[in-house]
Image (cartoon, rainbow, N blue to C red):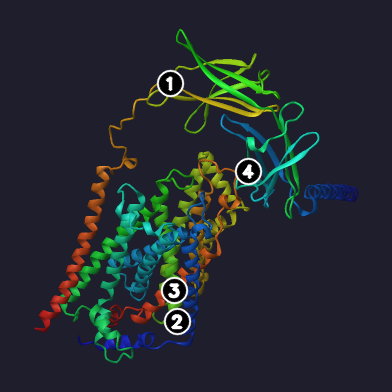
């Protein structure tokens, strides 16, 4: 009976071992497939930004680097930016990725970009590969949009209004539809969201909160944004309005210890007492050395 | 000053140390000088290129230079504490080893701050430390404390050597360069071994022994507060000051035992520095090792149990074998348990094994300083943005390696050169013992 059990256990163990080996070989194959020819895969992200004063096209390159396969930005990679239509592909420029893995192209009127059939712009961003990394490509399209911010106050109810227009092929400003606009106020470390609304006939509104602190005059910066839109990319407009609560200058009445320009008195006294205690003894020892010297002269006499 | 027969006998016994230099010693000096010279191009490159040639970046802004600084200042305390305490307690067996302890104090207190200068990016602003000093800044406390401590250590060493300077001045049989006599004469401050002078020296050393003990504790506490006063994981701890003090004396005692072993071999002091000295210091090492182990356990247990996010992240880094795990095992386990086992078991208590355990302690304490500084800086409270890998992780460059080794060579060289100028065994102290016997 025991022998039969042993054979059974050995058979099971052998089976598990074989299955494990097959599984490991598959995992190994998978890793090799991911890492063709020893080159790493480049992950590319493309973003389109439309600000009031400039328009940018940005590529962010990253790869799994090092033993831990941590996703990290890759710098010094040449990134080609192309303006594409159905019939043409024009190289705009080549930009090297920076330490954040970013290559940013500032789009100017001098580039005379060709529009696509929808009246927008299409781009292809390409990294052609090198000794370490495989090639990577990303397509992105965006239509030209602008946002205007205005402020309305009726019976002490304050409202922010945003109007968004799309620039058509013939230069006409067409009110934008089917897009959401988010409103923010920039804080010290991040953006404070104050509302979100959908555009109707190119217009949307949100109520303005009355409790936001502004600068000493009550001025606040308000941002209106279309974020990560498949059609328009990222669009941003900003305006300043004195609707914030005017901040009183901060007056520090008492000493704040280590953060203050003056040290706390207890610290000054402690330091003086400690240093005096040590140095009085040092001075005494110097006197002792002098007395040794003096005593030698007396002994000679 | 008329030298007694015992003093002359003692001096003759150690004269070869000052008079002759063996081939091995010459070889060692050349070896150390070569390492010191090798540091010069590294220093030049760092001066010209700036700190970009080191592993220090925006996130990890302190590297191995600060590790070395704390290490050297740490070992200096053992000299002060051991010589101070043993003198006050009038422990007889201290006499042959007391000068080695005092030398460790002075040399390492001189060498430590040099690494601060290497760590500073703008040496041209060095005077700002004084010009714009803020009493509430831990950096200012450190500048004041270390300067005061260095002066105190030099006075202590000098006072304890005046009698030997006088003996060397008045003994005509010494075959050394003529240039030395005027120096011995100057440093001996006309000491004639009168009753009053002996009393004055005794009074001076007693005062310095008393003052140097709290000063050493205070200075290393201040050093720990550079870290402890900042709100960073692994540093902001109330026990950091006593933890630093214990670790400092632990490493310093280790260096003292290693130095004793080296001098014993180098100058054939087998009948003066005996197994007794190694055993007694070994027991001090054992007590300090236990204390250090206790503090380490208390520190990490408290941080781990608190489960504070950043503290946990740091602890996982320290425990992860892919990051600092091996260093942590070496510093916290090998560096504590191995010396304790060697010293606690009577059969293992030989001169060589105690010296080996001490060497392990010294290396472990250097590694401990490394894992105090680097992992914490790699764990900032605001998360590190995904950026270049060398900005996130610190690794020593060859410049830093070379300057670290050069510093070690300077330490050994200073030690050796001082032993060629003054006997490593205090003649006045040992001859006094011999006369009593």
For the residues labelled 1 and 3, the Cα–Cα distance comes to 70 Å
Where residue A33 appears, as percent x and y from the top left, is 81, 48
Same chain letter for marks 1 and 4: yes
Same chain letter for marks 1 and 3: no
For the residues labelled 3 and 2, the Cα–Cα distance comes to 13 Å
Residue annotated with mark 1: A242
Task: Answer left or right for B138 relative to B395.
Answer: left
Residue annotated with mark 3: B412
Q: Is residue A17 visible?
A: yes
Q: Chain of mark 2?
A: B
Using the image, determine if residue A187 lies above or below residue B408.
above
Question: Residue B266 got which mark?
Answer: 2
Q: Specify few, some or many for label 4: CA neighbours under 10 Å numbering under 14, 14-19, or 20 or more.
A: many
Pointers 4 and 2 in contact (C-beta within 8 Å): no
Q: Earlier in the sequence, mark 1 or mark 4?
A: 4
Q: Specify few, some or many for label 1: CA neighbours under 10 Å numbering under 14, 14-19, or 20 or more.
A: some
Residue at (46% x, 84% y) in the render? B26
Task: Answer left or right for B262 relative to A13.
Answer: left
Q: Quadrant of residue A169?
A: top right
Where residue A142 appears, as percent x and y from the top left, is 69, 30
Question: Residue A282 got which mark?
Answer: none
């Amino acid at each position: 009976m025991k022998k039969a059990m042993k054979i059974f256990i050995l058979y099971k163990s052998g089976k598990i071992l074989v299955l494990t080996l097959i599984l490991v070989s598959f995992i190994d194959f998978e890793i090799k497939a991911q890492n063709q020819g020893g080159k790493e895969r480049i992950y590319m992200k493309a973003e389109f930004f439309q600000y009031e004063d400039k328009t940018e096209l940005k590529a962010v390159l990253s790869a799994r680097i090092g033993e831990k396969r941590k996703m990290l930005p890759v710098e010094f990679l040449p990134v080609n930016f192309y303006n594409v239509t159905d019939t043409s592909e024009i190289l705009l420029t080549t930009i090297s990725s920076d330490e954040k893995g970013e290559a940013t192209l500032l789009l100017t009127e001098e580039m005379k970009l060709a529009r696509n059939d929808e009246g927008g712009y299409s781009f292809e961003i390409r990294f052609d590969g090198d000794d370490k990394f495989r090639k990577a490509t990303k397509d992105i399209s965006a239509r030209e949009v602008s946002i205007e911010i205005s402020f309305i106050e009726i019976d002490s109810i304050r409202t922010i209004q945003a109007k968004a227009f799309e620039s058509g092929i013939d230069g006409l400003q067409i009110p934008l539809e089917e897009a959401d606009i988010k409103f923010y106020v920039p804080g010290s470390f991040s953006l404070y969201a104050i509302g979100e609304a959908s555009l109707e006939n190119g217009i949307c509104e949100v109520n303005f909160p009355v409790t936001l602190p502004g600068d000493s005059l009550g001025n606040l910066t308000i941002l209106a944004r279309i974020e990560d839109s498949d059609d328009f990319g990222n669009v941003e407009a900003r305006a300043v309005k004195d609707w914030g609560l005017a901040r009183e200058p901060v007056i520090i009445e008492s000493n704040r210890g280590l953060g203050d320009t003056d040290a706390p008195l207890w610290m000054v006294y402690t330091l003086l007492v400690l240093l005096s205690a040590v140095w009085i003894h040092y001075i005494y020892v110097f006197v002792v050395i002098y007395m040794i010297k003096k005593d030698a002269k007396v002994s000679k006499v | 000053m008329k030298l007694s027969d015992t003093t002359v006998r003692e001096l003759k016994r150690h004269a070869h140390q000052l008079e002759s230099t063996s081939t091995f010693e010459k070889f060692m000096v050349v070896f150390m000088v070569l390492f010191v010279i090798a540091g010069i191009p590294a220093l030049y490159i760092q001066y010209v290129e700036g700190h970009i040639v080191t592993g220090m970046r925006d996130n990890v802004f302190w590297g191995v230079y600060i590790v070395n600084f704390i290490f050297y200042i740490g070992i200096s305390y053992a000299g002060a504490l051991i010589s101070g305490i043993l003198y006050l307690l009038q422990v007889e067996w201290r006499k042959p080893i007391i000068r080695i302890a005092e030398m460790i104090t002075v040399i390492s207190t001189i060498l430590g701050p040099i690494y601060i200068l290497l760590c500073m990016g703008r040496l041209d602003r060095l005077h700002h430390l004084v010009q714009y000093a803020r009493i509430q800044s831990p950096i200012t406390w450190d500048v004041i404390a270390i300067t005061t401590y260095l002066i105190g250590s030099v006075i202590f060493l000098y006072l304890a050597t005046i009698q030997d300077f006088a003996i060397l001045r008045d003994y005509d049989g010494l075959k050394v360069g003529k240039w030395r006599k005027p120096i011995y004469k100057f440093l001996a401050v006309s000491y004639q071994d009168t009753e009053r002078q002996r009393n004055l020296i005794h009074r001076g050393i007693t005062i310095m022994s008393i003052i140097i003990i709290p000063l050493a504790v205070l200075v290393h506490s201040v050093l720990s507060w550079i870290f402890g006063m900042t709100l960073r994981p692994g540093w902001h701890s109330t026990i950091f000051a006593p933890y630093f003090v214990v670790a400092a004396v632990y490493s310093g005692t280790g260096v003292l035992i290693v130095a004793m072993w080296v001098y014993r071999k180098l100058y054939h002091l087998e009948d003066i520095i005996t197994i007794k000295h190694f055993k007694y210091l070994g027991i001090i090492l054992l007590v300090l090792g236990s204390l250090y182990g206790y503090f380490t356990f208390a520190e990490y247990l408290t941080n781990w149990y608190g489960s504070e996010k950043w503290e946990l992240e740091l602890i996982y880094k320290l425990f992860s074998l892919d990051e600092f795990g091996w260093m942590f095992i070496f510093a916290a386990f090998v560096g504590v348990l191995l010396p304790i086992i060697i010293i606690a078991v009577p059969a293992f208590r030989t001169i060589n094994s105690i010296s080996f355990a001490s060497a392990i302690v010294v290396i472990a304490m250097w590694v401990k300083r490394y894992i105090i500084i680097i992992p914490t800086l790699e764990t900032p409270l605001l998360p590190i943005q995904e950026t270049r890998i060398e900005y996130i992780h610190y690794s020593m460059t060859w410049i830093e390696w070379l300057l670290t080794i050069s510093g070690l060579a300077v330490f050994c060289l200073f030690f050796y050169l001082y032993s060629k100028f003054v006997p490593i065994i205090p003649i006045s102290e040992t001859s006094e013992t011999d006369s009593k016997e």
